[in-house]
Image: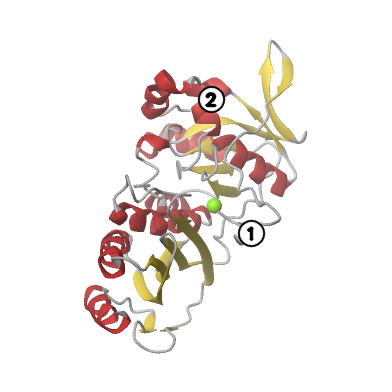
Amino acid sequence: MELSFLAYLRGRCRSLPSIFLGIGDDAAAMEPSDSLQLSCTDQIIDGVDFLSSSHKLSDAGFKAMAINISDIAAMGGTPNAALVTLTLPCQNSTSIAGEVYEGILEAASKYNITIAGGDISTYDGPLAISVCLLGEVSKEAIWRRSDAIEGDAILVTGPVGGSLLGRHLRPEPKIELARTLQGRCRVNAAIDISDGLSLDLDRLCAASGVGAELDIERIPIHPDAIILSETSGRTPFQHAWSDGEDFELLLTMKQQDADNLLSNHPELQLTQIGNTVGRTGLWKRNQGKLQRLPPQGYVHDLKPESPKSADTEK
Ligand SMILES: [Mg+2]
């Protein structure tokens, strides 16, 4: 299967100038650039991250690419090449690979990424799609989660919550917005919201050695969070606070830069939700007093007997 599939893929993948040698040899070869090379990897598994019984396999392929693209966006970078590994159930493996690749190639085309190589194998188990994504960013422009400074404004790039109604399968990583911001302001720290707004904000704060004082009424709640709250027994705010897979970005920058952006570029649809503070943890002010807010979200639980590899960066 692999040879004919490689021929099919080679016909469908376009190559970027930075790819010296793409699919078909023992390894891909890329031209080095003056920028830093970014690399990240993330895998999704049937029954864990999607359900092949109810989700389209092309959506699963798209998602596997998009979650990695979001990580490159969170570094302020631009993606350029992906290595894709499919682990396929034995039955119908060729048609499954074809369907998954429809979504992978759609994302590759939309975000200008070359599929530079990968691997396909079959076994008696559920479908797993693993993407290793490469990208680039200049040394001066890289965004780290650890560079927030006390007093920074905290911004979110769009409404959150309720992604489970469908957006989690077709995320829209904020690559374009990251590129626009690179030309307009200095972002001090950034992270993408994969596991929940509060949990990812807490991670950014912990990495930077700061805390956050939030104006929780300003957290933009997605309409899906309101719809989901009608049946979930949770409030729209709880969904916005802790649902994962929104793939919006959390950004921190000087308050003055945030003021400029918010007043001069409303088209970017950024919302300030608070400021970083010296006291660690997440806080809100209630009648003048600070009240601690526990972060909540999706935690990748690793049980000692689990063979799954550690997910240190999602
Ligand atoms: Mg991430």
Q: Residue at coordinates 41% horizontally, 57% vertically from top-left? A: 64
**Which corner quadrant of the image does residue 253 belong to?**
top right
Question: Foreground residue, 227 or 185?
Answer: 227
Seen from this angle, which residue lies furthest top?
287
Q: Residues within 10 Å of mark 1 (few under 14, many from 20)?
A: few
> Which amino acid type corresponds to the residue marked 2 in the rendered image?
Gln
Residue assigned mark 1: 310
In the displayed structure image, the side of residue 193 where residue 22 appears, left or right: left
Q: Nearer the viewer, mark 1 or mark 2?
A: 1
In the image, residue 198 sits, relative to residue 236, either above or below, namely below
Secondary-structure class at tag 2:
helix
The crowd level at tag 2 (other Cα within 10 Å; few <14, some 14-19, many 20+) is: some
Say which residue appears at 55% left-offset and 33% top-offset: 242
On screen, residue 131 above or below 194: below
User: Which residue is labeled 2 in the image?
Assistant: 238
Mark 1 residue's CB less than 8 Å from ligand 1? no
Q: Which picture quadrant has residue 119?
A: bottom left
**In the shown orientation, is residue 193 left or right of residue 8?**
right
Task: Give how far across and how far down residue 285 sits, in percent.
Answer: 68, 18
Q: Quadrant of the N terminus?
A: bottom left
Query: In front here: 160 or 245?
Result: 245
